[in-house]
Amino acid sequence: MDDWETKAKYNIAETCCDSISVDQLQEFSDQKDAPENAKSIIPSSKRMDYGEIRGSKELRQNLANLYSSKVGTPLLIDNILITQGAIAANLLVFYALVQPGDHVIVHYPTYQQLYAVPASLGASVSLWHARPEKDWIPDLDELKALVTEKTKMIVINNPNNPTGAILPKALLQSIVSLAAAHAITVLSDEVYRPIFHSTTPLDASFPPSLLSLGAAHTLATGSLSKAYALAGIRVGWVASRSAALTARVYAARHYTTLAVSQLDSAVAAFALSPAVVHRLLARNIALAKANLRVLERFVVKHDDVVEWVRPVAGTTAFLRFHRGGRPVDDRVLCTRLVQETGVLWCPGRHCFGRDRDFAGFVRVGFCCAEEVLKEGLEKVRIWMRKEFDDLPLAENAEGADGEAERVLEVSEHVHQAD
């Protein structure tokens, strides 16, 4: 992404819902005609000191309201810490709770930070594999087999990047119960929540936030970037039912964030306010539904060389390109595409796994502007008609179901892209 996103004409690797401006955000308010409302988003007359160190009370209250919806016990605002994006939230959790010699189990594939940072802190990291033949839902018995007496944390990503799969409610409950029995903390990266485009709360498998299960040994992280289309304000959070866990993360936060910009926090609080948040999310979920239909038509049209597990939630899909069942070299595919057509995708083997994992896979971020997705996929279609048969096959590839080592070494991963 660092190498190519500013050069690509059709960025359909980006994972945020199509970003909006502050002016556009204003239009989502059902009180936009109220006197002085426009001035209330950015506090131009307020002193720009550090503000409230945990994060603005208004922002934390809006988050607490969202987490407390349809839950018997409300989430306390003092159990929410505001950070500079979810990337800072995850880092703080690891920094505060993971020590050298600890063991961490990580849902895989996922965002690289979730396994690379614990490893860099001296923990051994085991991967809990999700596989396409099981709809990218990992097996609970495999998780149980990974637990050791040194296991301190289980990390999940729900909805998942890059697959767009969900961990269903029953599995979440089992993870929480297993962790409780072994005194293990569970971290759930929920940055793509609540973009549920292919499931509803009426479905038995619909996943609640981990915090909705009420367990004290759990934490959740999130941000305004992905589901709320506001990556530019750099606001995220850590939340927990446990005051003790929150206090440990808060102590670590003093040495990193100190405080989040009051300007950013004001925009975030406005976006998550009752007058705005539901319309904003409705826009982004509608975008995800419409664009997924566009992507699905592309996959169906090329089903002789493209396969996928249709995503259930989030903003990404993981497509596998092959010839006669053998994966093509996804890095060559993505490099040539961006150079020759301006279309940016993320190669799966390079960005999400070791050399034998995810050969032929590419991550597509389909929640960009609809015209960008349509035009970009049309460029890919034309290019594939002429060039696809000449792409090299992936070498030494076992595919996503290959038996890879379960324990990571730091040196294997610190050089990779996210």
Image (cartoon, rainbow, N blue to C red):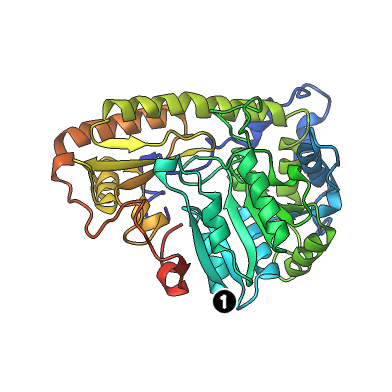
* Above or below for 67 versus 183: above
Give me the residue at 21% from left, 36% from top. Answer: 383
Which secondary structure lies at badge 1?
A: loop
Give me the residue at 40% from left, 56% from top. Answer: 351
Residue 43 in sight: no
| x and y percentages locating residue 385 in the rendered image | 17, 33
Residue flagged by tag 1: what amino acid is it?
Answer: Gly
Q: Which residue is mark 1?
A: 122
Left or right for 53, reference 158: right
Q: Nearer the viewer, residue 381 or 109?
A: 109
Residue 288 in sight: yes
Give me the residue at 29% from left, 29% from top. Answer: 378
Left or right for 42, reference 409: right
Q: Quadrant of residue 144?
A: bottom right
| x and y percentages locating residue 140 in the rendered image | 56, 50
| x and y percentages locating residue 248 in the rendered image | 78, 67
